[in-house]
Image (spheres, coloured by chain):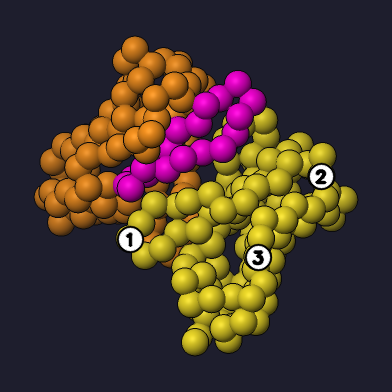
Chain colours: A orange, B yellow
Amino acid sequence: EAGVVQSPRYKIIEKKQPVAFWCNPISGHNTLYWYLQNLGQGPELLIRYENEEAVDDSQLPKDRFSAERLKGVDSTLKIQPAELGDSAVYLCASSFGQGEETQYFGPGTRLLVL
Amino acid sequence: GENVEQHPSTLSVQEGDSAVIKCTYSDSASNYFPWYKQELGKRPQLIIDIRSNVGEKKDQRIAVTLNKTAKHFSLHITETQPEDSAVYFCAASINAGKSTFGDGTTLTVKP
């Protein structure tokens, strides 16, 4: 079984530029999470989807961050415009849902904003 | 919201010794407590989890204990090996909802 897939793995952009990250969860997983992980810290939830619905986006900086999960499968996280402080690893995770809590993480996208 | 504190931030042990990492949480409604291992540059991987209806769970050299009254849970690794060296994260969540992670413990196992 394929794991959670993310792309790109690395991205370097200049500040004020837009950037997008893509995630393909494990087949059959209804719940999808986007996390931000700063160096030396634990992952912090940005947004959680149950199928197509964003059920928790309280930590998503909505002035510059947006996300979508069309058809309840793949998801895209976008930052526009990027700021220096956005440099971090962006992790996607998925779980089966319906009471099955185990989350499986993707390899992450390492973003560097110059 | 939930607050998870993890200690120690770094831990160095000799190969073969035991390692213990502790986490406390603030929301008494949390009922699911996973532990993740993250090697440098790699994804976090679940190593063990515990739900609030049990007090202890063991899987070979790894065990987790939960004290709901005190709101803390611990990871125990026995007979440590160099390949156990990594960053370990605890987390707490309510019914598969938002997971709050600790800041991690960097474990170094010296051969």
Percent position of residue A112, x then y: 21, 54
Q: Compare residues B83 and B64 and report the one nearer the observer.
A: B83
Amino acid at dot 3: Arg
Asked whether residue A57 is drawn in magenta, I would say: no
Q: Is residue B103 visible?
A: no
Say few, some or many: other residues with alpha carbon within 10 Å of mark 1 (under 14 / 14 to 19 / 20 or more): few
Q: Are marks 2 and 3 on the same chain?
A: yes
The residue drawn where x is 18% and y is 38% is A19
Give the mark nearer the N terminus: 2 vs 1. Answer: 1
- The chain under label 2 reads B
In this rendering, would A13 be left or right of A32? left
Amino acid at dot 2: Val
Q: Quadrant of residue B29?
A: top right
Percent position of residue B45, x then y: 48, 51
What residue does disc 2 label? B54
Give the mark nearer the N terminus: 2 vs 3. Answer: 2
Residue A109, compared with residue A38, is above or below; it is: above
What residue does disc 1 label? B41
Give the mark nearer the N terminus: 3 vs 1. Answer: 1
- The chain under label 1 reads B
3 or 1: mark nearer the eye: 3
Disc 3 versus disc 1: distance between alpha carbons? 24 Å
What residue does disc 3 label? B61
> Which portion, as a residue range, is magenta?
A90-108
Disc 2 versus disc 1: distance between alpha carbons? 33 Å
**SS at circle 3:** loop
Percent position of residue A13, x then y: 13, 49
Do the residues bearing badges 3 and 1 touch, measured as CB atoms within 8 Å? no
Do the residues bearing badges 2 and 1 touch, measured as CB atoms within 8 Å? no
Q: Are marks 2 and 1 on the same chain?
A: yes
Amino acid at dot 1: Gly
